[in-house]
Image: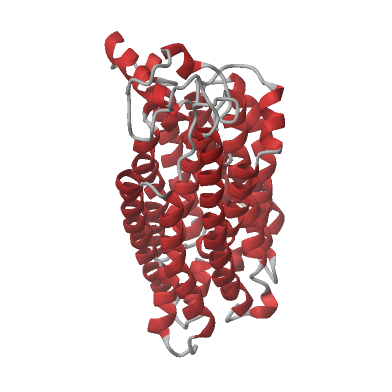
Amino acid sequence: MGIGKDLKLKGNDFTNAATAFFIAYLIAEVPNGVVLQKFPAAKWLGFNVVAWGIACACTAAAYNYTTLLFARIFLGIFEAAIAPCLMLLSSMWYTRAEQAPRFSLWYCGLGFGQILGGLVSYGFQHVKPGDGALAGWRVMFITLGLVTVAIGIVTTVWLPDSPMSAKWLSEEERVWIIRRVRGNRTGILKKGVKWRHLIELLVDPQIWGLVLLTILISISSGVITTYSATIIKSFGYTAPTTALLNTPSGLVSIVFTLFVGFGVRNASHRWAWIVFCCIPGIIGGGLLSFSPHHNRAALLAGIYMVNAIVPTLAIIYQWTISNCAGSTKRVAAVTLVAGAFSVGNIIGPQTFQARDAPEYKPAKIAVMATQSAGAVVAMALFGYYVWSNWKKEITVVDGIPAEKEGQVGVETGDTEEDGWKNLTDRQDKGFRYVY
């Protein structure tokens, strides 16, 4: 769209700007974790959406590499709160078995964003500025920023902080929702930090397995999200055609996200669905890496197939929120996993170096390699959860079995108070990990 030319970007400037976004995203996760212990997630979400929209609109004022870098840093700071807030809010309303398709629905926004972004980019590339007129990319940033601000205001006003503050529900309906999620055994969000929870988090193997899995998956998603248009353009297409050819990636993302989300709801086995998504990602990485440069069909197929990995992050987010109990541990876990997402996206764009243009083969091979490693880590987590549940099964818990995934309100002999104790998943002997 001419942003590189207008801002006189050179060498790895674009790559570094993309990296700066995720460095800011990573650093911002620390204060996010603290704020979410003390402040309602819905209000924090709305504030950050509004602030992100303002930062997006201000990007139009960038006039060189430095100002673009500042704009990207603020975008990263405000986007860092989005995933943790959505994870925590979704977990308040639904049982662990119901959460996967709900996570998938809001995660489809990424695919819709790809489609809308491609169409908007195509349209604004036809805006030819006259004397004193703004370039198309500047108009695009202003427009998208203002729309986001409006959505953020609606979010702040309309989205309830919890089922108990939802004005459209009766008192009986609020109590029913709270009682039905008791079987999650993840407790409720309480203000204040419990240091025991944080210590347990640091020595919990599942957390570091989820962090590693997120980093591996995010390296590939960072490559595709940031550079898919660059890769497609390297096939020899014009900039407007590239924007249009990028839109099917969003459709692939949406289809796989919905299919996997509802698949987890009906068949569970989140690890298997992650492996399922990694397979086309591996094949797509292979096509990008080793297809002849003149074979555009194979190269485009590779780009689209790699987008099948998008729903794996939604599964990981839901896996994290389902398997981490205790208020402080749960908030810390979701912010840590969200931070891991940014680490992967810091690494991903750095695989695109100017010296590798136009084919960027090392970056394409990185997609294939990280997807293969991600599938292995998912299987290892499956084994760990099976082993952990077996250990809990052989521990006597007053002779009372835990509630199984998908069984809401099942009589197990424990009291209602037991479901609301602020215990971690390790402390609660009746807690069972889902996989």
Is residue 395 among what the camera can see? Answer: yes
* Residue 83: % across, % down: 51, 40
Determine the image quadrant of residue 284.
Answer: bottom left
Is residue 54 among what the camera can see? Answer: no
Left/right placement of residue 396 relative to residue 266 reads: right
Determine the image quadrant of residue 422.
Answer: top right
Q: Is residue 152 above or below residue 74?
A: above
* Residue 300: % across, % down: 41, 77
Q: Is residue 168 above or below residue 32?
A: above
Left/right placement of residue 87 relative to residue 17 reads: left
In this view, the residue in front, 263 or 416, is 416
Determine the image quadrant of residue 332.
Answer: top right
The structure's colour scheme is secondary structure
Name which residue lies at 58% across and 64% down. Answer: 373
Name which residue lies at 58% across and 54% down. Answer: 213
Left/right placement of residue 399 relative to residue 94 reads: right
* Residue 74: % across, % down: 63, 43
Name which residue lies at 45% across and 74% down. Answer: 283
In this view, the residue in front, 429 or 154, is 429
Q: Is residue 172 above or below residue 139?
A: above
* Residue 390: % across, % down: 52, 40
In this view, the residue in front, 69 or 309, is 309
Total of numbered circles in the picture? Answer: 0
